[in-house]
Amino acid sequence: MWLITTIIAAIGVTILWYVEPKIYKLDLLSLMLWGASCMILVDHILGYAGGSFVEMETDGLINNSILLGIVMLIPVFIIWLTILIIQKPQQNIERR
């Protein structure tokens, strides 16, 4: 289910990228989310040993796969916000 969570986030950000102004760098966030989705898909394909392809429970620290998907999205959003904060003052300096 964490594959589905990441794909839904990637689709949502891609739609926002077409609607919102370009100053928010949603293209970078969209690219990071689609990259994560592709990596998770490859992981699912290579680790598939029969049974259901999308599972609702995991064997790790986080048992709920939806919660795992949300937890996996947090570092992506933190990296995106950090880049956005760092590059915003540089854009204001260049406009002067």
Image (spheres, helix red, strand yellow):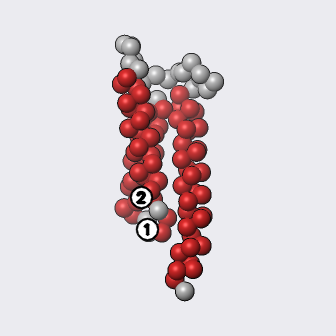
Residue 22 numbered tag = 1
Q: Pointers 2 and 1 in contact (CB under 8 A)?
A: yes
Examine the rendered structure and indicate whether residue 93 appears above or below residue 86.
Answer: below
Q: Position of residue 75 (x, y in %)?
A: 58, 45
Residue 27 numbered tag = 2
- Residue displayed at 52% across by 80% down: 94
Which residue ends up furthest to the right in the rendered image?
Answer: 61
Between the C-alphas of marks 2 and 1, the distance is 8 Å
Q: Is residue 72 visible?
A: yes
Residue closest to the eye, 71 or 82: 82
In which quarter of the view is residue 85 placed? Answer: bottom right
Q: How many marks?
A: 2
Q: Is residue 53 visible?
A: no
Q: Residues within 10 Å of mark 2 (few under 14, many from 20)?
A: some
Examine the rendered structure and indicate whether residue 48 appears above or below residue 4.
Answer: above
Determine whether the residue tagged by mark 1 lies in a helix, strand or loop: helix
Q: Residues within 10 Å of mark 1 (few under 14, many from 20)?
A: few
Disc 1 residue type (three-letter) = Lys
Q: Is residue 47 left or right of residue 96?
A: left
In which quarter of the view is residue 37 placed? Answer: top left
Quadrant of the image for the C terminus?
bottom right
- Residue displayed at 58% across by 44% down: 74
Q: Position of residue 47 (x, y in %)?
A: 41, 20
Q: Position of residue 88 (x, y in %)?
A: 56, 70
Determine whether the residue tagged by mark 2 lies in a helix, strand or loop: helix
First along the sequence among labels 2 and 1: 1
Disc 2 residue type (three-letter) = Asp
Residue 35 numbered tag = none
- Residue displayed at 41% across by 35% down: 39
- Residue displayed at 36% across by 61% down: 18
